[in-house]
Image (spheres, coloured by chain):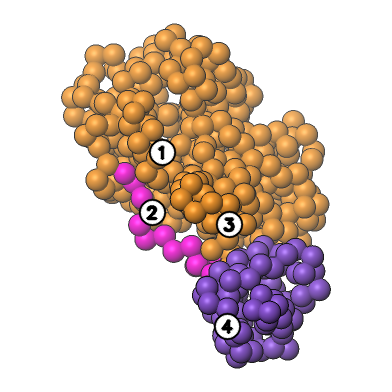
Chain colours: A purple, B orange
């Protein structure tokens, strides 16, 4: 996605789920905004793949320092939307 | 000296999974070779691993975990002190498929296309690491890479680890998944693989090996540890000998000096005489050089044709599994002792005057009372390892 539209929360949540399913994370299909990485057994290597998927999808760049406070699905969705908004502005 | 016994066996090859069904297939003279390769076509990595675990492992790691699972179940070492459990599992070439895919992605799309799992999937010690994680083995753990001698080196070094008192139990063996485009092309370019895709060790028309894939893993224990927990014993790793040809990076020394040394050292380690050995599972690659030189070396060690026991090459049925070959052949050797049956050398139709031992071409053959097998593995780099396996 190269055009700078702001994705909705539902859209990003769906994309996060889709990527986590693609990398075979158990329980990814039913992950919600409140789901923490620890519940899904998502580790730093999974996050590298998720970050690339979100960057490619929404034309954003997620830096390592922005990733540290991201503890779960809701954090990732919020960060993605914030970066997409910043990009548009 | 600490006696080292085998309490678990696991194997995955193109002829199926599980030590006994695999050995039955060899006795049935079945071949797992198709179109010049020996793939494990029916192997499903998600039987032994979760989908996520399987995705995060190269095929050589998947094969090893599956074989280790079989061996672990057979051994059932409940109550093992985790810090007294080790792992020595090697591979000839490691995660080549992962290497090729990521290299291509990098060249075509750049850095971001490289998987964060590239290194942990490709690294040769990945299989040993995965097995240690799965079974909670916190003692010594590492990988061996000595090309086609890897499996025997791994089992031999595991024996040494137990003898040194560093572990009570060691999961050991070899694994290989090198049926990739680059690897097949490379062996073809060297002239090492058969142009016609037929593995016919010791035959006059042999023209190279056929590559297979697979893994074999054994659970080794000190006899004392196995006895204390009442474990079933499948055999003993009685002797291990290792040597270098120090001659050429791919060709064996023409006098077979490294092979002779490895066999001699293994017999000495076992406290055995050549006459104690009832069967030799040969390296027997089906290359012109190996089979001729190995034949000469066996005759040298065993005192000529009259002294040499029957010899066969099971690579005729499953191809050459490189770093897994020695471990697979250790499983075969144990089964041969257990059943009193020698597996055949397939496709041996035209005798070669320079290969004039008894290669069991018409096998399987009954070998009642068989109690000691010598199994050879010789690797590129000139590295050789021989095991002497004996009955329970």
Q: Earlier in the sequence, mark 2 or mark 1?
A: 2
Question: What's the magenta bit mostly, secondary-structure-wise?
Answer: loop
Using a 10 Å C-alpha cutoff, classify the residue at mark 3 as few (fewer than 14 neighbours), some (14 to 19) or many (20 or more).
few
Observer-nearest residue: B162 or B274? B162
| Both marks 2 and 3 on one chain | yes
> Which quadrant of the view contains residue A58?
bottom right
* B325 or B29, nearer to the observer: B325
Q: Is residue B153 left or right of residue B96?
A: right
Give the residue number, with chain letter if any, for mark 3: B112
In the rendered structure, the answer to whether residue B66 lies left or right of residue A69 reads left
Bounds of the magenta segment: B37-51
- CA gap between label 1 and label 4 equals 46 Å
Label 1 sits on residue = B183
Residue B216 at x, y percent in the picture: 51, 47
**Do callouts 3 and 4 point to residues on the same chain?**
no
Say if mark 1 contacts mark 3, CB within 8 Å.
no
Q: Secondary structure at mark 2?
A: loop
Which residue was labeled with disc 4?
A: A5
Q: Would you name the residue on which mark 2 appears?
A: B40
């Amino acid at each position: 996605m190269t055009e700078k539209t702001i994705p909705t929360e539902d859209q990003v949540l769906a994309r996060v789920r889709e990527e986590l399913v693609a990398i075979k994370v158990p329980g990814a299909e039913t992950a919600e905004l409140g789901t923490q990485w620890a519940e899904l057994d998502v580790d730093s290597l999974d996050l590298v793949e998720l970050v690339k998927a979100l960057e490619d999808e929404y034309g954003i760049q997620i830096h390592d320092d922005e990733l540290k406070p991201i503890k779960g699905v809701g954090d990732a969705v919020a960060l993605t939307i914030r970066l997409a908004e910043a990009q548009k502005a | 000296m600490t006696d080292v016994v085998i309490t678990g066996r696991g194997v995955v090859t193109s002829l199926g999974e599980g030590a006994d069904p695999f050995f039955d297939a060899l006795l049935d003279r079945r071949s797992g070779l198709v179109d010049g390769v020996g793939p494990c076509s029916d192997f499903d990595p998600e039987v032994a691993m979760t989908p996520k675990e399987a995705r995060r492992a190269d095929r050589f790691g998947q094969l090893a975990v599956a074989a280790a699972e079989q061996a672990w179940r057979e051994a059932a070492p409940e109550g093992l002190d985790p810090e007294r459990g080790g792992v020595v599992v090697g591979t000839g070439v490691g995660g080549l498929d992962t290497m090729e895919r990521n290299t291509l992605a990098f060249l075509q799309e750049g850095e971001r296309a490289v998987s964060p799992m590239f290194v942990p999937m490709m690294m040769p010690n990945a299989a040993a690491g995965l097995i240690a994680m799965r079974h909670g083995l916190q003692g010594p753990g590492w990988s061996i890479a000595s090309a086609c001698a890897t499996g025997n080196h791994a089992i031999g070094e595991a024996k040494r680890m137990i003898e040194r008192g560093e572990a009570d139990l060691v999961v050991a063996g070899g694994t290989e998944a090198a049926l990739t485009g680059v690897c097949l092309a490379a062996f073809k370019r060297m002239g090492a693989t058969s142009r016609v895709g037929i593995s016919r060790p010791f035959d006059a028309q042999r023209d190279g090996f056929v590559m297979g894939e697979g893994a074999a893993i054994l659970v080794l224990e000190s006899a004392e540890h196995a006895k204390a927990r009442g474990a079933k014993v499948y055999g003993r790793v009685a002797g291990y000998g290792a040597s270098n040809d120090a001659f050429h990076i791919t060709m064996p020394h023409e006098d077979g000096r490294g092979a002779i040394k490895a066999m001699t050292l293994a017999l000495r380690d076992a406290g055995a005489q050549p006459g104690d050995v009832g069967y030799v599972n040969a390296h027997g690659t089906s290359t012109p050089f190996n089979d001729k030189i190995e034949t000469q070396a066996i005759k040298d060690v065993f005192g000529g044709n009259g002294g040499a026991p029957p010899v066969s090459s099971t690579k005729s049925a499953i191809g050459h599994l490189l770093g897994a070959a020695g471990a697979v052949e250790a499983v075969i050797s144990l089964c041969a002792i257990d059943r009193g049956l020698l597996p055949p050398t397939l496709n041996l139709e035209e005798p070669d005057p320079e290969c004039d031992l008894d290669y069991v071409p018409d096998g399987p053959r009954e070998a009642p009372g068989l109690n000691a097998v010598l199994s050879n593995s010789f690797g590129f780099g000139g590295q050789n390892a021989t095991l002497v396996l004996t009955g329970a």
